[in-house]
Amino acid sequence: MARVLVIGGTGYLGGLIAATLLTRTQDVVVLATRPGHERDDIVARLRMEITAAGDREGDSLERLRIVPLPAPGDARGFSGLFREQRIEEVVNCAGAVHYHDVAALKQSNVDLVNDLLAASKEARIARFIHISTAFAHGFTSEAAPETLLAEPAGDPTEYTRFKRRAEWIVAESGLPFLILRPSIVIGDSRDGHYFGPPYGLYQYWQSFAKVLMSRYRETIHVVASSHKLPLLHQDAFIATLMAARETLKEDAFVNVVSSPDLLPTVEELWRLFSDLVVHPRELRVYGSLEEAPLASLDPRYQVFLAHTAVNTEIARHPWRFETGHRDRLMAHGLVFPQVTIDSVRKCQSRFAGSSESVRRYHQKFEALFPGAPKEPRALADRLETAGGGWLL
């Protein structure tokens, strides 16, 4: 039994990690949070993942401690936190998700990391686990190595630049470390559940539903490349984290990514969403935003394309990753669910069933769908028939 400090536990991956440590280990999980986060809200979010993991009574929550995170630069506060809670290991999942807010990115990826490392050294913790991103190596033609990253020719956003900088700080601290770099995380491979905010693929789905599904559109326009989208199921990420934490005893960088052979392309993902959720009469696909007929599209379409432009540009890059650690862990028993078009369908079905915008759209316009049955069926029935894995 260890006492593990989780930073960023109010976020998606941090909450997922905290819930996993509670349900799969006997560790005491200390979750340090900034002001503004209510305890009941934190516990409610963790309870969803804990319940999904099989702990329906929530007994594992007895080993959860929620404490205030000291203010930036408060060395005495951080030292006191580590001492009072007897911290033995740190899992740092913190990191502002705003792509271009340099001040917020610096605070979460540089200032906070320095504060945590200083207190960790003083407390002589066993290991510092840091959650980065698979895209920290920036825009390069080479496969992302599982080593300390060099400065690339360019970055997708300021976010990736600061995530790389945080890796440097951790690796140069002298503490034992494990740095994990997950790609675009989506829901559970088994039932598609996802309790996180609308990032990545969910940003596209939610933005389209909210902005463009107020009326039926016979033709929809999307910017979608033929590149594979580096998606990762949350259970594959968690399984890799737990296996690496147990097995990798030396300092390590681990690219946590799915095998590219089975990954769907961006265009295939849009066709899936079109066929099972939107049901237009025509889908028009453009290779880039410059190819799309923006001037002829209505303002709502322009808002959608602008809102998703950064992620669309990232998706156009031919990302490649070294996966030596993942492959060796798999050879020794790691079960790593791969992302396929069918596994994404489960996640999409789960999203569609929980989206009020999608529900209203189907209620209003189902009779206009191509090939609509004489007797309209419920959205859940259609997705189940299509193999959508309806599991709400």
Image (cartoon, helix red, strand yellow):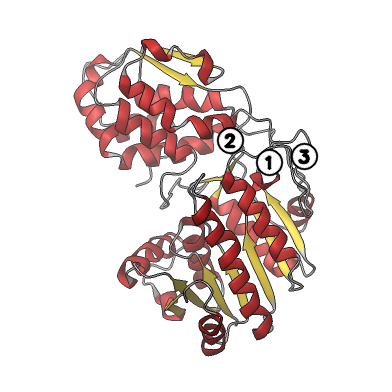
Q: Which residue is mark 1?
A: 138
Q: Earlier in the sequence, mark 3 or mark 1?
A: 1
Q: Earlier in the sequence, mark 2 or mark 1?
A: 1
The quadrant holding residue 109 is: bottom right
Which residue is at 22% across, 16% downward? 374
Label 2 is placed on what type of residue? Thr
Up the image or down, 294 lies above or below 161; here it is above
Element class at badge 3: loop
Q: Is residue 330 visible?
A: yes
- In the picture, measured across the screen, residue 206 lies left or right of residue 321, that is left
Q: Earlier in the sequence, mark 3 or mark 2?
A: 3
Residue 312, image x, y percentages: 53, 30
Label 3 is placed on what type of residue? Ala
Marks 2, 1: nearer the viewer: 1
Element class at badge 2: loop
| Dot 3 alpha-carbon crowd within 10 angstroms: few under 14, some 14 to 19, many 20 or more | few
Mark carried by residue 143: 3
Which residue is at 65% across, 40% downward? 155
Label 1 is placed on what type of residue? Gly
Up the image or down, 29 lies above or below 258; here it is below
